[in-house]
Every structure is written in structure tokens, then in C-alpha cells.
């Protein structure tokens, strides 16, 4: 009798495009699911095939609206109740991660609450890429595979063959991530220092490091409204930079982001496909270059399923 647990990959609605690429890399078909939507907006996902005894991987980024995280929780619960052997959440973009601490009184720690919800739903393991803060791994009481998208970005940066390359951090918080890139690429580091007036609004900004005559790549984990990154790019160009690019794993790109990028002095914005880009046909995407994380996730899924070491997937 064969006791090898079957591998099955499923997707929630928000990340279907990425799940298809991951399944393709693994030479698997995405499992059949359906979603019943009630008149009031309530929804009920269902597996349309048996998952009994299977190792189930569910792909879903948990960006707002909150339906995305809740659909993932319902899918985890459904798999658990259908006697899946293991239920593993593949969360390319872990939403609510900016709420990783109490940065002022009387606020929640949203990232910890999301971790608790996944635990309560019956999740056995989570895979994610470039968390907003590394310590979020400690919010989970089960294994976390924290993947760095640097393994797709570094070859791309090297292929650009830029002379006088410098890496820039858009703020003090991103210095550690940017420093890792500058160390691996063997180039200088610039730190942009900003003062925030309030969330998503940047006040003044200055740069620490040599800017003049450099081709600069600003490194961040996400681009949301693109306020910080475009202001940093314009400031660096004013200070004599030859060119400025931005690189971020998660293209949240909300509100005026596309318009700001289009009008800024950024030469290129390099992102991954952890989140879908806008479906707005009028959005200017001419500066945006998308690299896929599908093969990284496929590789880690394969190794976890076959009980192999995944340490080679961690560049930093």
C-alpha cells in the first residue's frame, strides 16, 4: 500500500494567475474549486475533488480587501475538515504586515492577529516572500518558509551591466535590505532620510552617501502609493544621479501610484508578480518590469513536499 501523500495545488481567486505559473513549473494541474456567492456578498469556497490524505498547498496573497485573507482561511478550514494530511498556505504577499508592532498607543498588531487566524483555521505551514519585517516569522507557532525574491532580482540587475552602480534605501527602515544588495553586488550604499507628515505622506527628504554620477537602484519590499520612491528618485536626480531605478518585491501600487511613477524621473520600476497589477486600461505601465516568483515558490514547494533542505532558496 502506497503511503506517499499526494501533492495538490489549489488557488483562491486573487492569486489564480500566479498559482497557474507555479503549478506549470511543477508540471501539475491546479485543483478544482468553486465559490458560491450569496446575494449579500457572503461567499463559500469548496473543493471539487478529494483532498483526503493529500498535502494541500493553497496559493493566495492576503492584500486588501479583507475577502482575500478570509477566503484563504475558509479554504484552509475546508481542507482540514476534508481530511487533508497537511495544509500549507502559500502567501506570496503577506498583507497587514505593516502592523508588526505597536508604534503608537491603542493600535492593534495586525500581522500577529492574521498569524493567529491562520493557526486557528488549521494551517500547518506558511510560505511567503520578503516580509515587511523579518520578525513576523516569530508570530507563527508553526514553520514559516521566508523566501527572498533577491534570487530573481540580482541576476536582472547584473544583466543591466550598469557602470557606477549604487544601491539606495528609501528610508532608514529599509537600510538592512539595501545593504544586503550592495554587499552582494559590491557597490556603495546610499540612504535616503525622510520625515513623514502622516501615513502615506512624505515630508522632507535628503540623501546620505555619494549620489553624483551614479546609476542608482532604490531597493524596498513594497511600493504602495509610490510617494516615497518617486520623491526619492526626483531628489537623487536633482543631486546629480545619472539614472534612478526602483526595485520592490510587492507592487501594491494603490491610489495615485501609477500616475506618480509615470510622471517621476524613475527610469524603470522592477517588481515581482506576488500581486496582480491593475486591470485599469488607462494606467501607464511603460516603466514597470515584472519578474516572476513562480519558479522560486515551485522549487520550495517541491523541496518541502519531498522533505529536502530549502536553505539554498535563502540568498540573504
Image (cartoon, helix red, strand yellow):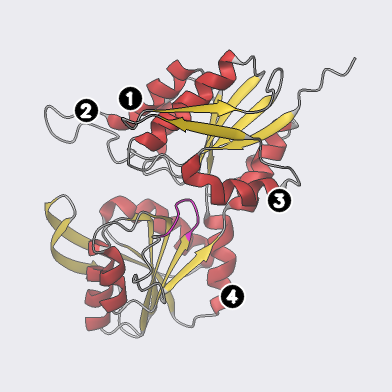
Q: Which mark is residue 25?
A: 3
Between circles 4 and 2, the one closer to the viewer is 2
For residue 204, side relative to residue 251 (left or right): left
Mark 1: secondary structure: helix
Q: Nearer the viewer, residue 190 or 271?
A: 271
Question: Which residue ends up furthest to the right in the rendered image?
Answer: 1
Sequence order check: which comes first, mark 4 or mark 1?
1
The residue stretch that appears in magenta = 272-277
CA distance separating discs 3 and 4:
23 Å
Between circles 4 and 1, the one closer to the viewer is 1
Residue at (45%, 52%) from the top-left corner?
A: 275
For the residue carrying disc 1, how many other residues have a C-alpha within 10 Å: few (<14), some (14-19), or many (20+)? Answer: some
For the residue carrying disc 3, how many other residues have a C-alpha within 10 Å: few (<14), some (14-19), or many (20+)? Answer: some
Mark 4: secondary structure: helix
Sequence order check: which comes first, mark 3 or mark 1?
3
Q: Nearer the viewer, residue 238 or 306?
A: 306
Dominant secondary structure, magenta = loop
CA distance separating discs 1 and 2:
8 Å
Q: Quadrant of the N terminus?
A: top right
Q: Is residue 104 visible?
A: yes
Mark 3: secondary structure: helix
Where does the image place residue 248, in percent across and percent down from the top left? 41, 59
Residue holding disc 2: 108
CA distance separating discs 4 and 1:
41 Å
Residue at (57%, 14%) from the top-left corner?
A: 81
The answer to whether the residues at label 3 and label 1 have Cβ atoms under 8 Å apart is no
CA distance separating discs 4 and 2:
43 Å
- Is residue 98 highlighted in magenta? no
Q: Is residue 264 visible?
A: no
Q: Which mark is residue 113?
A: 1
Where does the image place residue 190, in percent across and percent down from the top left? 32, 67
Between circles 3 and 2, the one closer to the viewer is 3
Amino acid at each position: 500500500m502506497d503511503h506517499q501523500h499526494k501533492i495538490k495545488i489549489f488557488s483562491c481567486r486573487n492569486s489564480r494567475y500566479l498559482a497557474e505559473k507555479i503549478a506549470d513549473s511543477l508540471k501539475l494541474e491546479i485543483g478544482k474549486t468553486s465559490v458560491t456567492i450569496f446575494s449579500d456578498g457572503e461567499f463559500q469556497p469548496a473543493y471539487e475533488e478529494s483532498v483526503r490524505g493529500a498535502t494541500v498547498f493553497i496559493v493566495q496573497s492576503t492584500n486588501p480587501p479583507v475577502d482575500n485573507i478570509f477566503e484563504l482561511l475558509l479554504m484552509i478550514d475546508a481542507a482540514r475538515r476534508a481530511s487533508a494530511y497537511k495544509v500549507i498556505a502559500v502567501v506570496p504577499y503577506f498583507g497587514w504586515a505593516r502592523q508588526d508592532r505597536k508604534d503608537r498607543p491603542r493600535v492593534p498588531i495586525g500581522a500577529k492577529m492574521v498569524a493567529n487566524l491562520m493557526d486557528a483555521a488549521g494551517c500547518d505551514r506558511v510560505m511567503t516572500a520578503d516580509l515587511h519585517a523579518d520578525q513576523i516569522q516569530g508570530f507563527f507557532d508553526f514553520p514559516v518558509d521566508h523566501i527572498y525574491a533577491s534570487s530573481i532580482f540580482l541576476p536582472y540587475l547584473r544583466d543591466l551591466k550598469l557602470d557606477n552602480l549604487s544601491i539606495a534605501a528609501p528610508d532608514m527602515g529599509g537600510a538592512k535590505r539595501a545593504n544586503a544588495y550592495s554587499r552582494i553586488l559590491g557597490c556603495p550604499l546610499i540612504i535616503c532620510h525622510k520625515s513623514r507628515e502622516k501615513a502615506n505622506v512624505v515630508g522632507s527628504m535628503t540623501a546620505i552617501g555619494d549620489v553624483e554620477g551614479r546609476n542608482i537602484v532604490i531597493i524596498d519590499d513594497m511600493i504602495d502609493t509610490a510617494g516615497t520612491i518617486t520623491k526619492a528618485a526626483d531628489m537623487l536626480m536633482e543631486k546629480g544621479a545619472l539614472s534612478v531605478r526602483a526595485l520592490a518585491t510587492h507592487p501594491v501600487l494603490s491610489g495615485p501610484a501609477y500616475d506618480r511613477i509615470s510622471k517621476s524621473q524613475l527610469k524603470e520600476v522592477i517588481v515581482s508578480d506576488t500581486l496582480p497589477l491593475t486591470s485599469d486600461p488607462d494606467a501607464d505601465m511603460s516603466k514597470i518590469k515584472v519578474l516572476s516568483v513562480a519558479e522560486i515558490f515551485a522549487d520550495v514547494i517541491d523541496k518541502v513536499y519531498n522533505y529536502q533542505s530549502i536553505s539554498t532558496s535563502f540568498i540573504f
